[in-house]
Image (cartoon, helix red, strand yellow):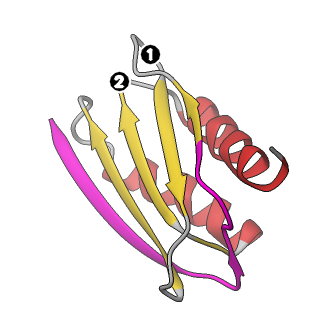
C-alpha cells in the first residue's frame, strides 16, 4: 500500500462534503470536504505502487482546470487514469449540486 500527498493552489472553495465511487477491483472512491485552507489537499491510498507520475499528471490536469479548494481523500484499488478523471469530475459535480 502506498500513500501519496499533493497540494494544489485554488480559487473556488468546495462548500459541502461529497462521496463518489467504491473501493473494489479496478475502481476507487473519492471523498471531498470543505476546508478553510487556501489550497486543495489530496491524500491517495493505493494498492498499485509505482504510479506516482501518472497520479501527478491526472491530478495536475484536474486542478489546473477546476481550481477548487478542499480536502480530497482518494482510496484506490487499481483504477485507470480515465476512471480517476471521471471520478474527480463526478465528486466535484456532486459537491456542487446535491
Q: Give the overall secondary structure of the magenta segment.
A: strand
The dot on residue 53 is none
Q: Residue at x 27, y 30 (%)?
A: 48
The dot on residue 77 is 2
Give the left or right position of residue 48, taking residue 24 as reference.
left
Please state the horizontal and vertical placement of residue 37, each as a whole percent of the image.
48, 85
Image quarter of the N terminus: top left
Real-space Cα separation, disc 2 to disc 1, in angstroms? 5 Å
Q: Secondary structure at mark 2?
A: loop
Q: Kindly indicate the quadrant of the structure image that contains residue 87.
A: top right
Local packing at callout 1 (Cα closer than 10 Å; few below 14, some 14-19, many 20+) is: few
Image quarter of the C terminus: top right
As for residue 17 lying within the magenta part, the answer is yes
Q: Kindly indicate the quadrant of the structure image that contains residue 19.
A: top right
Please state the horizontal and vertical placement of residue 51, each as a whole percent of the image.
33, 43
Q: Are marks 2 and 1 in contact (CB under 8 Å)?
A: yes
Please state the horizontal and vertical placement of residue 93, each as a whole percent of the image.
79, 47
| Residue at mark 1 | 26
Magenta span of residues: 1-18
Q: Residue at x 63, y 68 (%)?
A: 63
As for residue 64 lying within the magenta part, the answer is no
Q: Secondary structure at mark 1?
A: loop
Would you place residue 51 above or below residue 16 in this image?
A: above
Q: Residue at x 35, y 24 (%)?
A: 77
Residue 38 vs residue 61, the one in the foreground: 38
Amino acid at each position: 500500500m502506498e500513500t501519496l500527498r499533493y497540494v494544489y493552489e485554488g480559487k473556488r472553495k468546495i462548500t459541502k462534503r461529497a462521496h463518489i465511487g467504491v473501493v473494489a477491483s479496478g475502481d476507487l472512491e473519492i471523498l471531498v470536504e470543505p476546508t478553510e485552507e487556501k489550497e486543495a489537499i489530496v491524500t491517495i491510498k493505493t494498492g498499485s505502487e509505482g504510479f506516482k507520475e501518472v497520479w501527478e499528471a491526472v491530478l495536475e490536469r484536474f486542478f489546473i482546470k477546476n481550481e477548487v479548494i478542499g480536502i480530497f481523500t482518494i482510496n484506490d484499488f487499481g483504477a485507470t487514469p480515465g476512471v480517476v478523471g471521471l471520478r474527480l469530475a463526478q465528486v466535484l459535480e456532486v459537491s456542487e449540486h446535491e
